[in-house]
């Protein structure tokens, strides 16, 4: 078994430029099969054990049909903590954001059940009370994601678009933002993920996912990183207000988000 969660993954200047232009990047062979099995089994086990969904798919809202979602698994398991604190992913996050260090905002598993619905188009930063755009999500499929399982889909270069930044994940965001992206002619990257492939996207890059038409679950772990110097801003909607209380409690507006729940994961004085 070959497991080294801290091994660096070098990026070329071309890849960095691609990420700056597109607001997302897909990288192959970030993890090997042993690593995905080792951490993936634990992440999927915890997701099934801890999720609170009780309704059958057909009785749920669009949001709840998209996935089972469990957050901050790193607090539940030493093995998951090792994964979330891993230097390979955190180093990639810092390099892509072009910052000296990154902290954890939070992690979450996203488990699209067989028959699960679409993930409506949105940008993540609608939910986050943070002062700059230096946020990034690592989307780590724990198995390959063929087209019929609902891979993550990106609107390349959409990170500068203001339209739709005030919409959370909903039927309305899917309809209005997707129509806007199509009208503006944004390139849509809707491709499968190989085993070991990982994507990173900025907090303001618009993305979606198709339904899971297969008979296998699409199990994914995500880690959300932010610039180590990220400042808390006054919330501009109820979701940001709730995130402040949940992910960075006791931080004053205008100060660095530095709490035990937002550990430094790379750079700075990380040891
Ligand atoms: O996994 C999905 O279907 C959506 C993921 C997503 O929106 C995200 O990680 O930002």
Image (spheres, rainbow, N blue to C red):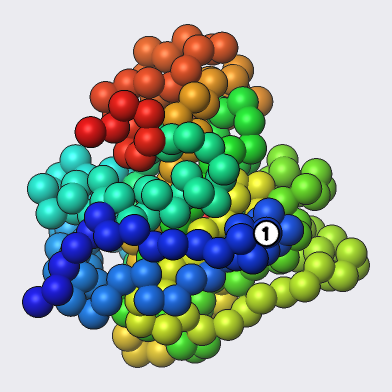
Q: Quadrant of the N terminus?
A: bottom left
In the image, 84 versus 190, the foreground residue is: 84
* Horizontal side, residue 193 vs residue 210: left or right: left
Q: Which residue is mark 1?
A: 17
Which structural element holds mark 1? Answer: helix
Q: Which of the 4 image quadrants contains residue 135?
A: top right
In the image, 104 versus 14, the foreground residue is: 14
Please say if 44 is above or below 52: below
Q: Name which residue lies at 40% across and 49% down.
A: 91
Please say if 77 is above or below 128: below
In the image, 210 versus 252, the foreground residue is: 252
Residue 127 in view in this figure: no
Instruction: Where is residue 165? Give x, y as percent.
Output: 72, 43
Q: Name which residue lies at 24% across and 72% down.
A: 36
Instruction: Where is residue 48? Give x, y as percent.
Output: 21, 63
In the image, 149 versus 99, the foreground residue is: 99
Q: Residues within 10 Å of mark 1 (few under 14, many from 20)?
A: few
Q: Name which residue lies at 14% across and 73% down.
A: 2
Q: Name which residue lies at 72% across and 65% down.
A: 156
* Horizontal side, residue 199 vs residue 259: left or right: right
Instruction: Where is residue 83? Give x, y as percent.
Output: 23, 54
Please say if 31 is above or below 237: below
Residue 83 in view in this figure: yes
Q: Quadrant of the C terminus?
A: top left
């Amino acid at each position: 078994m070959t497991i080294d969660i801290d091994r660096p993954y070098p990026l070329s200047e071309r890849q960095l430029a691609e990420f700056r232009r597109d607001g997302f990047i897909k990288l192959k062979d970030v993890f090997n099969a042993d690593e995905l099995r080792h951490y993936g089994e634990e992440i999927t086990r915890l997701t099934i054990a801890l999720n609170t969904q009780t309704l059958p798919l057909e009785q749920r809202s669009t949001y709840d049909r998209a996935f089972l979602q469990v957050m901050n698994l790193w607090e539940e398991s030493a093995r998951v903590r090792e994964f979330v604190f891993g230097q390979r992913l955190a180093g990639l996050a810092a390099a892509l954001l072009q910052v000296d260090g990154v902290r954890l905002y939070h992690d979450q598993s996203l488990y699209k059940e067989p028959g699960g619905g679409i993930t409506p188009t949105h940008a993540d930063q609608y939910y986050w009370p943070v002062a700059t755009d230096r946020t990034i999500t690592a989307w780590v499929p724990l198995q390959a994601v063929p087209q019929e399982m609902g891979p993550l889909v990106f609107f390349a270069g959409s990170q500068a678009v203001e339209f739709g930044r005030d919409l959370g994940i909903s039927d309305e965001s899917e309809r209005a933002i997707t129509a806007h992206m199509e009208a503006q002619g944004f390139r849509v990257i809707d491709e499968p993920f190989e085993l070991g492939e990982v994507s990173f996207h900025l907090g303001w890059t618009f993305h979606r996912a198709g339904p899971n038409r297969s008979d296998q679950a699409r199990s994914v772990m995500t880690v959300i990183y932010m610039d180590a110097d990220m400042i808390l801003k006054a919330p501009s909607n109820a979701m940001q207000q709730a995130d402040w209380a949940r992910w960075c409690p006791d931080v004053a507006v205008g100060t660095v988000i530095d709490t035990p729940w937002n550990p430094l994961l790379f750079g700075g004085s990380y040891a």
